[in-house]
Image (cartoon, rainbow, N blue to C red):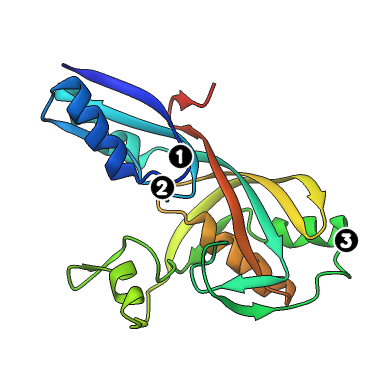
Amino acid sequence: MDGILNIDKPRGKTSFSIVAIVKRLSGERRVGHAGTLDPAATGVLPVCLGRGTRVIQFLTDADKTYRAEIELGVSTDTYDASGKITQQGDPAGIDREQLDTVLGSFRSLIQQTPPMYSAVKYHGQPLYKLARAGIDIPRKSRQVKIHRLALVDWQPPVATVEVECSKGTYIRSLAHDVGQYLGCGANLKSLVRLRCGLFDIQ
């Protein structure tokens, strides 16, 4: 079987488990996904089968669009709602105008540090395995591009944003960095991938 499935990944499933399900149901051995989504995230996950796996790299390199809920006032070690609290602050004085100004500083080429709880490799080991063992590794920042970062809703302390970005962008890191910039901390409350290259959630 050859082709690409545009799957709306449900919450709680890993990207790898979705590939395993498609492999089992299709009977095709050559199956892979184009761009990992965290288990808590939902949305567009292109899964390639057979000769379709030849375009995985092109899809992985494509720009992505996300809708994210960022909760101000709480930072965690995973940078999302599943982690242990590492910082708490009071976001009461932050208004929509101030928040939009801060978001504006991220609408460009930026240097971003991947979270410890990520699949980035260190000496062949995924960082998340080291993090679970209590090992914190200095991570190198890397350049990513935020093409668009729009504040679509503000219900304090939660800001809903839409992000159009280059490959390699961690929305969890973006949420964390916004919280550090504001001085009150923040974490990623929820995430939906709306688009991956040509594939749209619609």
Location of the C terminus by quadrant is: top right
| Coordinates of residue 51 in the picture (x, y in percent) | 15, 22
Residue 56 to residue 89: above or below: above
Q: Left or right: where does residue 125 sit relative to residue 133?
A: left
> Neighbour class for label 2 at 10 Å: few (<14), some, many (≥20)?
some
**Dot 1 corresponds to which residue?**
63
In this view, the residue in front, 44 or 132, is 132
Q: Left or right: where does residue 150 sit relative to residue 34?
A: right
Residue drawn at point x = 29 percent, y = 22 percent:
4
Q: Give the amino acid at mark 2.
A: Lys
> Neighbour class for label 1 at 10 Å: few (<14), some, many (≥20)?
some
Q: Could you tell me which secondary element the residue under label 1 belongs to?
A: loop
In this view, the residue in front, 58 or 67, is 67
Label at residue 95: 3
> Neighbour class for label 3 at 10 Å: few (<14), some, many (≥20)?
few
| Coordinates of residue 58 in the picture (x, y in percent) | 30, 35
- Of the residues tagged 1 and 3, which is closer to the observer? 3
Tag 2–tag 1 contact (CB < 8 Å): yes
Whichever of callouts 2 and 1 sits on the residue coming sooner in the sequence is 1
Residue 150 to residue 89: above or below: above
Residue 98 to residue 40: above or below: below
In this view, the residue in front, 168 or 92, is 92
Q: Give the amino acid at mark 1.
A: Asp
**Dot 2 corresponds to which residue?**
167
Location of the N terminus by quadrant is: top left
Residue drawn at point x = 75 percent, y = 55 percent:
158
